[in-house]
Image: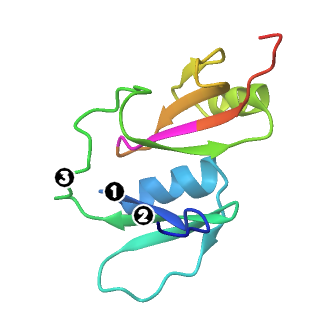
Amino acid sequence: MIKTEGIHHVSLAVVHLNEAKAFYGDILGFPEIERPPFDFPGAWYQVGFQQLHLIVCPEAETLRPSRKISSRDGHFAVRVLDYDHTLNYLREKGVPVLEKPNSKSGFAQIFCSDPDGNLIEFNVEQKKSR
């Protein structure tokens, strides 16, 4: 068995780095962190104890052909403190969302996509009153 400490980072392929940086840094507010001087463009962000690595790779096979939001497609999830605050904030920023406040998963979920179609889930433990 492999002994793990947790997930260190998630890497996502992007096409337009400036749009991706505006989304993750300006809209979502993830702090950008120092990135090694690779020979390809990208950006790194701190998300809690984990990192998000953006890699500019227009030929990546993981890029989705649409920005349709589906909870069943590949995504990464970020645990947030407040469902309603997160939902209202994303709406104020004009980010289209898919709401699943009563998901069978046991957590209330909000899904959205970044400018390149990568899917993101924001979740909290479900309130019993939902």
The residue tagged 1 is 14
The residue tagged 3 is 61
Dot 3 falls on a residue whose secondary structure is: loop
Dot 2 falls on a residue whose secondary structure is: strand
**Mark 1 or mark 3: which is in front?**
3
- Give the quarter of the image for residue 130: top right
- Please report contact status of discs 2 and 1: CB closer than 8 Å, yes or no: yes
- Return the residue nearer the eye: 86 or 27: 86
Residue in the picture at 50% in, 33% down: 112
Label at residue 58: none
Sequence order check, earlier mark of 2 and 1: 1
Query: Which portion, as a residue range, is magenta?
Result: 117-121
The picture places residue 37, in percent across and down from the top left corner, at 41, 89
Q: CA distance from mark 3 to mark 2?
A: 15 Å
Drawn side of residue 16 relative to residue 49, left or right? left
The residue tagged 2 is 54
Q: What amino acid is at disc 2? A: Leu
The picture places residue 49, in percent across and down from the top left corner, at 68, 65
Q: Examine the rendered structure and indicate whether residue 74 appears above or below residue 18.
A: above
- Give the quarter of the image for residue 20: bottom left
Q: Give the class, few, some or many, for how many residues have Cα within 10 Å of label 1's Cα (few <14, many ≥20).
A: many
